[in-house]
Amino acid sequence: MKDLENRVALVTGAGRGIGAATARALATSGARVIVSDLTAPTELADEIGGLAHRQDVTSEAEWVETIAFARTKAGGLDILVNNAGVLGTGGPTTGISLEEWRRVHSTNVEGVFLGCKHAIPALAERASRWSGGSAIINLSSVAGLVGFGGAACYSASKGAVRLMTKCLALELAPMKIRVNSVHPGVIDTVMGGLVVTNVASISGLGNNEARTQVDQMHPLGHMGRVADIAEAIVFLASDKAAFMTGSEMVVDGGLTAR
């Protein structure tokens, strides 16, 4: 079904992993998708009939340019998926430099703030077209819900995204803009591989043993797939989620149910 037909979506960090899968899923549901990343994902854009755009989400000037691009090239914006993020260096807090802390937060927190700030006027202009209004979906993490030893920097950034989402949901409800967060478990991506590497480093395990440990963190017994997260995002973007705002959609194989 083409639940998102005639809508325009912007997905940041769309060059690979969850972002690329989300772009494909949104396009399959009928949306015209703008895919942005540090290098414009032109091959993906061609594949899905979308538009590629080069963007650094930590730059306010580039966010202004990106929203202008959506207006001029696609006619506006209905869906914003703030997906771009970095894992950063894991390990003891005493080993995290202030520079590294700021690097992670500039992407994971400031990038989401800037995206929402500059997309709101464009989203508000078209919100009345849809029974569920316009939609912002912010990628947080299970690390934004519960603590993990050796992950203070990343968890703090994703916790900030969680509460920013709730504040924006209250602020933007009168404009018919819904704002929800998605909280993946460990997903089988390049970043998921880095989680395995961090676990191996902290625990002293080999990579295979660390991978098994990460799989077993999830009661379902394995890491998630990018499609698991992409389909959750499509649902939140659609009118099927018309009564959802300020919500946390947890897609984690049961990890936080323990």
Image (tube, helix red, strand yellow):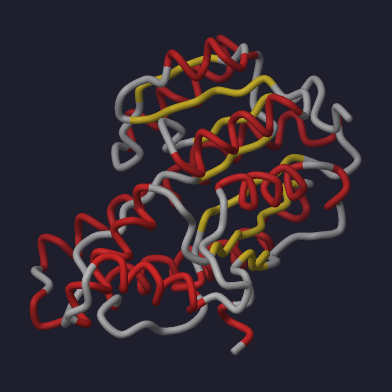
In the rendered image, residue 157, in percent from the top left (x then y), is placed at: 36, 66
Query: Image quarter for residue 7?
Result: top right
State whether residue 27 is above or below residue 128. Answer: above
At horizontal 37% and vertical 50% (from top left) the residue drawn is 85
At horizontal 63% and vertical 73% (from top left) the residue drawn is 220
> On the rendered image, what quadrant is the N terminus found in?
top right
At horizontal 62% and vertical 70% (from top left) the residue drawn is 253
* 138 relative position to 213: left or right: right
Q: Nearer the viewer, residue 24 or 134?
A: 24
Q: Nearer the viewer, residue 78 or 4?
A: 4
* 216 relative position to 194: left or right: right
In the rendered image, residue 24, in percent from the top left (x then y), is placed at: 62, 29
Query: Image quarter for residue 252?
Result: bottom right
State whether residue 139 is above or below residue 249. Answer: above
* 180 relative position to 241: left or right: left
Q: Residue at the bottom extreme?
A: 258
State whether residue 115 is above or below residue 104. Answer: above
Exactly how many numbered labels are in the figure?
Answer: 0
At horizontal 43% and vertical 27% (from top left) the residue drawn is 36
In the rendered image, residue 66, in percent from the top left (x then y), is placed at: 44, 25
> On the rendered image, what quadrant is the C terminus found in?
bottom right
In the rendered image, residue 154, in percent from the top left (x then y), is placed at: 32, 68
